[in-house]
Amino acid sequence: MTAADVFSDVDEDAYYALAVLWAVQNGITSGTGNGNFSPNQTCTREQIVTFLWNAAGKPAPTISECRFSDVVR
């Protein structure tokens, strides 16, 4: 399997293709939807936090308050 098999917008010769495939195989990301990875889009803070949370094994939260004033609950 290649990243191109998973995402229509990731060329199998792209320099990042193996990293994308690794991230999918390790449950870090599933892309942005509709068979896309969106490699040319800027990652949002929410996406980065999700990548890190997935990489850490999806630990349970230890706090309940949100420390970011721009996050709507």
Image (spheres, rainbow, N blue to C red):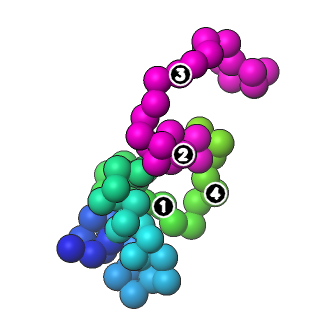
Marks 2 and 4: which is nearer the front? 2
Q: Which residues are magenta?
A: 48-73
Q: Is residue 46 magenta?
A: no
Helix, strand or loop under label 2: helix
Return the mark for residue 52: 2
Disc 3 versus disc 1: distance between alpha carbons?
A: 28 Å
The location of residue 62, given as percent across then percent down, is 57, 19
What's under tag 3, amino acid-wise?
Pro
Marks 2 and 1: which is nearer the front? 2
| Sequence-earlier tag: 2 or 4 | 4
Instruction: Give the class, few, some or many, for how many residues have Cα within 10 Å of label 4's Cα (few <14, many ≥20).
Output: few
Instruction: Give the class, few, some or many, for how many residues have Cα within 10 Å of label 1's Cα (few <14, many ≥20).
Output: some
Q: Nearer the viewer, residue 30 or 58?
A: 58
Helix, strand or loop under label 4: loop
Residue under label 1, please give it. Answer: 38
What's under tag 2, amino acid-wise?
Leu
